Amino acid sequence: MKIVSSVALAPEQRAAIAGAAPGAELIDRQCRSREDIEALVGSGCDVLMTFHVPSSILAPVARVRWLQLLTAGADHVLKQPADLSRIVITHTSGIHSVVIAQHVFASILAFNHRFHLTLRAQLRHEWLEREPFMAGVHELRGKTIGIIGYGSLGREVARIAQAFGMSVLALKREPKKLQDEGWVIPGTGDPDGSIPREIFGPDQREELLARSDYVVITLPHTKDTYHFIGARELAAMKPQAYLVNVGRGELIDQQALVEALMQKRIAGVGLDVFEREPLDPQSPLWDFEQAILTPHIAGSFSGYMDRACELFVENLRRFVAGRPLVNQVDLSRGY
């Protein structure tokens, strides 16, 4: 078996992979371009672990049987014109759940404690008056958070929200399926789906939005989730509600969001993802005082490849034994 990683591995990572597949040939090198990946794969391989996937790698001549993506989303692969039915594709959903959930609450807490205002005032050397400032600060305890997308990430957001004393509402594709079937970091999330007070289906999103003080979007991008939040959904939200998107930029109709912010129909927004990235320097989103923007970095952390290799090694053991893999992409669903 030939295993190729388009990311350079640390010695301990190589050792763990070798232990999971004794006798396998392992090649790893840091690839900076799609051409680098094609050259590394060469005449073909059985298993490829990578962030980026050139279309040539998906052709039958490449012989790839299992593609382990180093991303949570698979939309960049599924949109390529290739027959993917012969390849097992897995993603890394779950490895980022802790760090992205922390990012979500960093955004919520920064907004709730008005840091987006104090940081601007600091740059102006301005001392803010306490009384008007205090009127905009609220306790999270007793508030309601609506989580749109209840996979590993949404469940970790729910766990933290519960610790803050918040009431949790959740939305998932199949509300009656409570178990988390993806890869889970031990001690995190909500494996049995017991935290939410209520779980809604996709066609009930306006009810969830209307009842939530904070809304967090963690959905994947598929044909069914494109512009999942548009003008109608934004109009259903409370005027004092705060919206956070750490899923994909295409989940929100960005123009409708700009209009909602201009008209102050929602209190604020935290965005880590955008319809087009990088965000256009001329976008009005940059200038909204009530917007906290980050450049698609919520899932980045120093232990990324260690956590990714933990998942890969577990899947490699399963692959060698002929058992089903964790986080396998369902081609019909698009994630």
Image: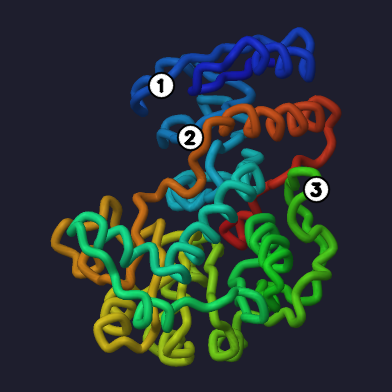
Residue 266, image x and y in percent? 39, 84
Residue 248's disc number: none
Against 281, is 231 above or below?
Answer: below
Residue 194, image x and y in percent? 83, 70
Read off the residue under disc 3. Answer: 187
Residue 104, image x and y in percent? 53, 59
For the residues labelled 1 and 3, the Cα–Cα distance comes to 34 Å
Q: Secondary structure at mark 1?
A: loop
Read off the residue under disc 2. Answer: 51
**Badge 2 vs badge 1, beta-carbon distance below 8 Å:** no
Read off the residue under disc 1. Answer: 31
Residue sitting at x 41%, y 33%: 54
In this view, the mark in front (1 or 3): 3
Q: Quadrant of residue 21?
A: top right
Residue sitting at x 57%, y 19%: 4
Q: Residues within 10 Å of mark 2 (few under 14, many from 20)?
A: some
On screen, residue 67 versus residue 321, left or right, reads left
Residue sitting at x 21%, y 55%: 123
* Any part of residue 21 in sight: yes
Q: Secondary structure at mark 3?
A: loop
Amino acid under label 1?
Cys
Against 151, is 33 above or below?
Answer: above
* Any part of residue 250 in sight: no
Screen quadrant of the C terminus: bottom right
Screen quadrant of the N terminus: top right
